[in-house]
Amino acid sequence: MATQLPEDRAESVFEDYKPAYNALQATAEANRCLYCLDAPCITACPTAINIPEFIRKISTGNVKGSAKTIFESNILGMSCARVCPVEVLCVGDCVYNEMDRPPIEIGKLQRYATDIAFEKGWKFFEAGAPTGKRVALIGAGPASLSAAHRLRRFGHAVTIYEKRDVIGGLNTTGVAPYKMKADRSIEEVEWLLSIGGIEIHTGKEVGVAPTVAELEERFDAVFFGIGLGPDKHLGLPGEDLDGVLGAVDFIEQMKLQALDLQGASRAVVVGGGNTAIDAVREAVGVGFKHVTMAYRGDEKKMSGYQHEWKAGKLEGVLGAWRTQPIEYVGKDGHVIGVRCVKLDADKKPIEGTEHVLPADLVLVAIGQSKLLDALNNLEGVEMDGKKVTVDKHGATGRPGVYAGGDLANGAKEVVNAVAEGRDAAEAIHRYLMGTEEAADA
Amino acid sequence: MPDLTSNCAGIKSPNPFWLASAPPANSGAQIMRAFDAGWGGAVWKTLGQPIQNVSSRFGGLHYRGTKAIGFNNIELITDRPLETNFKEIYEVKKRYPDNAVIVSLMVETKEEWKDIIKRSIDAGADGLELNFGCPHGMCERGMGSAVGQEPTVNERITSWAVEYSTVPVLVKLTPNVGDIIPHGLAAQAGGGHGVSLINTIKSIIGVDLDNMVLQPQVDTLSTNGGYCGAAVKPIALHMVAQLARHAEFNLPISGIGGVSNWRDAVEFIALGSTSVQVCTEVMLRGYRVVEDMIEGLENFMEEKGYAKLDDLVGAAIPSYSEWGNLDMNYETVAKIDSESCIGCHLCVVACHDGAHQCIHANDDKSVFVPVVDESECVGCNLCQIVCPVPDCISMVEVDNGWDRATWNEHVAGTGKLRPKKGAH
Ligand SMILES: Cc1cc2nc3c(=O)[nH]c(=O)nc-3n(C[C@H](O)[C@H](O)[C@H](O)COP(=O)(O)OP(=O)(O)OC[C@H]3O[C@@H](n4cnc5c(N)ncnc54)[C@H](O)[C@@H]3O)c2cc1C
Ligand SMILES: Cc1cc2nc3c(=O)[nH]c(=O)nc-3n(C[C@H](O)[C@H](O)[C@H](O)COP(=O)(O)O)c2cc1C
Ligand code: SF4
Ligand code: SF4
Ligand code: SF4
């Protein structure tokens, strides 16, 4: 099932950018939490973890209860504690911000409790009594894993099909290593699987083999948690030169294997979203001395989080604003630079501003394509171009077919995928047990 | 999973956590919400001739940035009509048959006691609690702590209540006495089935320095109130343990006073309580605090191998002895872990100014870790108490070659004491 990852993965050079709390730090921070009622931090958490309660339990020394409170709402609470952009989620809404005092470090506290739970091997959940119903989940990313666990608690039989050899989805292959490394994500999946009765088939691309029709035939319900497809490209001359890669592709290589980067010194990342920011920081981390982010808009207009970009700047990354690549320049089949042009306020090229940014590596981070082929021909399944259309419980228009995570929300965070997977599992349960109306009423 | 069921003087509840008789247990709607949150029982806000309260009523003791580590109030017993209370008690018991509802009572004459006890039991009370404790307002009217401070009156009224009651009777004791023992024994002699303690401690919570009026302020005046909350726990633990270990006292105890989390509750239970009551922490944080109390107690019992609550009740009592039985030859000294020391020198100032002048700044100014002069250290613990770093200072036993000898043995001529340390 889980493939053994090599020790010398390129990602191993990174250290945690938010170091773990020790018991003293955790207790001191927990005691600072006000234990608010109807706490805004809960509303800001897509999985609605009872944050004041889990923090109070840390302060009283009931760490086991604390971890249970977290996992009850979010079974991937361990990785979310590390990878969530808490600055724009729970922490961003902590009432302390209103007092102009530092907000509670919810993510670090969550990491404290869940790390101890892993270390101690605590188990909190058991599979429900068998219902005889079978559910297929496609993709072994956060959405499917969260759904699978909840379905097992209801007692349904669960099978996951994953096209890659590794499990965990982008949590394993995409998340920046200074937040979490691939092996920790895989460890989490294995911990989650210990509820028992979740079959995982890796190396199985649904649509190729098995087909969706086969799954619908053999299962009582199907959940799609396939995320997004490969990196998009700009379609520029020189795209097939060595050293021009999609950013997500590069990140996956960095996380899963060793990279030979000898002599590499300059990297250019094209884009201005979170993947672009991760990519520039990762390029610095693996040893590139000159790293530039080329973005067609202004610094303030970037879609990536400003707090992350600030961290990148502190690490020495440069920003090239209103800069549009027009060609990759190569030598002996390898990229040596990106020819760019400056854009005016209306995004029109400014004549005479053409220049070449030297580069040994170019990472294109302008978004991932949509992986909708598998779903395209299913009657009743609607798409709004970018994503699969689902109701608030994750149901598509086709009976028994559900979806959640990046493919249904148009690419958000791990924690959104967890929430959507969990809620879809609740809806699937009602569908399978014939109690659907009761919940909608 | 350990069994948390509690049986306190015949009053059964699914767990030992009860709301104390106070504002959180003022009405049926509140108590039902509390039971939904997980509370095992509730002692109804004291019933009697309904009174009228003043405004304001409460004060808090804030210390080094933490609000309300102590709490004080000048409110009285229920201000709601008795009929309303009884109707609600009936309703609560009907809807929550497994939770304990104990009705707290405070009236004056024998006839009044007879009447109110009958009505409480008719309404469905699982037990009664006689409020002999309130230290303000009621005692001036010859009730509350005016009863609790007088063992003969306590015994007499307890015996009336026991005579009229068909359900267990707990006597709630006041801590505003020099020695709790005669009061516990009086409740026992009166036939009470158990005691609850402590009620609040006479107090003045503070003075408003701008207008020179005590707090809480009622216009331009104030009065002494009852003190409770986290800060009173040590006083309550002592009184509970005093009774629990007393040879002639053998009633079950419901422990009260400063319980804020599951650890506090375990302490009360380990010192002899079969149920614990909570007021202030609920007033400050709500019924929801019980989730962690139950879970923390459960996890603790599981981890330490206590199968049921009774196995834990009184577990620490055997360690409670007289000063004269302590081993005077047992010696400890402070040891500083130089790895974790942060160099704040709080231990140095505490030892120099408040203890035995035996922790010193290092002579080598480049080393910030202080030095303990072990030949002078009396092992008092002060440095360990002030040190901000957990486990940085430990008190380590010294093998001084002396055999065990207590003060009592010394007086009896059977024990030989080591030379005094640090007494120049
Ligand atoms: C570079 C990068 C960094 C990120 N960093 C963060 C971060 O720090 N914090 C955060 O919260 N979020 C981050 N995200 C977003 C987050 O990773 C996703 O929102 C989340 O993983 C979505 O979960 P999912 O289950 O929907 O999809 P995925 O995680 O993408 O999982 C989908 C799985 O389905 C498999 N699959 C696809 N097609 C098929 C098929 N036909 N048959 C079988 N299997 C298939 C895929 O191989 C994959 O394993 C990042 C994303 C990227 C790209
Ligand atoms: C505002 C307030 C009102 C109280 N009213 C009563 C009461 O009516 N009857 C009673 O027996 N005790 C009363 N008490 C005392 C509590 O029941 C309890 O014994 C005491 O507060 C100690 O517990 P704590 O530290 O958990 O608050 C009151 C306490 C407070 C703070
Ligand atoms: S908003 Fe902040 S202080 Fe309030 S409960 Fe949440 S983390 Fe605690
Ligand atoms: S707590 Fe409620 S009753 Fe008391 S003063 Fe505030 S608003 Fe008024
Ligand atoms: S109080 Fe503790 S941390 Fe501070 S100097 Fe003393 S030993 Fe070191």
Image (cartoon, helix red, strand yellow):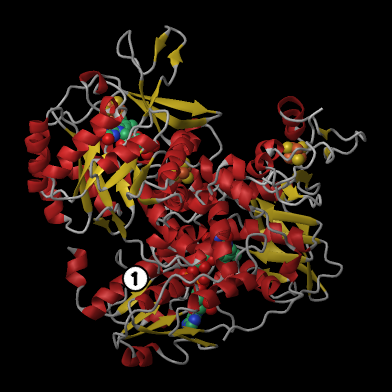
Which is more toward the observer, B188 or A163? B188
| Residue at x 38%, y 46% (from the top left corner) | B248
The reply, left or right, for residue A180 in relation to residue A60 is right
- Tell which subunit mark 1 falls on: A
Mark 1 surroundings within 10 Å by alpha-carbon count, few (fewer than 14), some (14 through 19), many (20 or more): many
What amino acid type is highlighted by mark number 1?
Ala
How far across and down, in percent of the image, does residue A127 sit? 38, 79
Is A143 drawn above or below residue A207 in the view shown?
above
Q: How many marks?
A: 1
Which is more toward the observer, B17 or A339? B17
Quick check: which quadrant has ligand 2?
top left
How far across and down, in percent of the image, does residue B250 sit? 35, 50
| Residue at x 29%, y 59% (from the top left corner) | B14
Identify the residue at the far front of this view: B413
Is B326 drawn above or below residue A251 in the view shown?
above
Circle 1 sits on which residue? Answer: A424
Is A297 drawn above or below residue A214 in the view shown?
above
The reply, left or right, for residue B191 in relation to residue B322 is left
How far across and down, in percent of the image, does residue A116 sit? 58, 63
Q: Is residue A280 visible?
A: yes
Secondary structure of residue under mark 1: helix
How far across and down, in percent of the image, does residue B377 sit? 79, 38
| Residue at x 30%, y 54% (from the top left corner) | B38
The reply, left or right, for residue B384 in relation to residue B362 is left
Which is more toward the observer, B93 or B315? B315
Q: Quadrant of the C terminus of chain A?
A: bottom left
The quarter holding residue A214 reads bottom left
